[in-house]
Image (tube, rainbow, N blue to C red):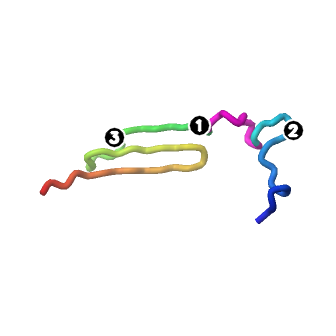
Amino acid sequence: MGTESDIKLLDKNGLRLDGRNDMELRPIRIETNVLERADGSAYIEWGGNKIMYRFMVLEK
């Protein structure tokens, strides 16, 4: 692991290395109800992360 002085987070113009400024989020994509056999579901892409979420309601 690098020390604080070794890690470069911003370029000389104050932009992140991927070109975003310090207040700009990574692109976000959200789709809901993507699975048929679930009470609810969502697919989320945030930057390089991909998440599939589902839930089912269990009645007692």
Of the pair 18 and 25, the residue shown nearer to us: 25
Q: Could you tell me residue 40's position as x and y percent?
A: 30, 45
Position of 18 compared to 46: left or right?
A: right
Q: Residues within 10 Å of mark 2 (few under 14, many from 20)?
A: few
Badge 2 or badge 3: first in the primary sequence: 2
Q: Which residue is mark 1?
A: 27
Q: Amino acid at mark 2?
A: Lys
- Residue displayed at 39% across by 50% down: 53
Q: Amino acid at mark 3?
A: Asn
- Please state which of the two labelled residues, at mark 1 or mark 2, is closer to the viewer: 2
Q: Main secondary structure of the magenta part?
A: loop
Q: Which residue is mark 3?
A: 33
Disc number for residue 12: 2
Q: Amino acid at mark 1?
A: Pro
Q: Work out how far the residue at label 2 is from the one at label 3, CA to CA, in angstroms.
A: 43 Å
Pointers 2 and 3 in contact (C-beta within 8 Å): no
Q: Work out how far the residue at label 1 is from the one at label 3, CA to CA, in angstroms.
A: 20 Å
Badge 1 or badge 2: first in the primary sequence: 2
Q: Secondary structure at mark 3?
A: loop
Highlighted magenta segment, given as a residue range:
17-25
- Residue 22 in magenta stretch: yes
- Please state which of the two labelled residues, at mark 1 or mark 3, is closer to the viewer: 1
Position of 38 compared to 12: left or right?
A: left
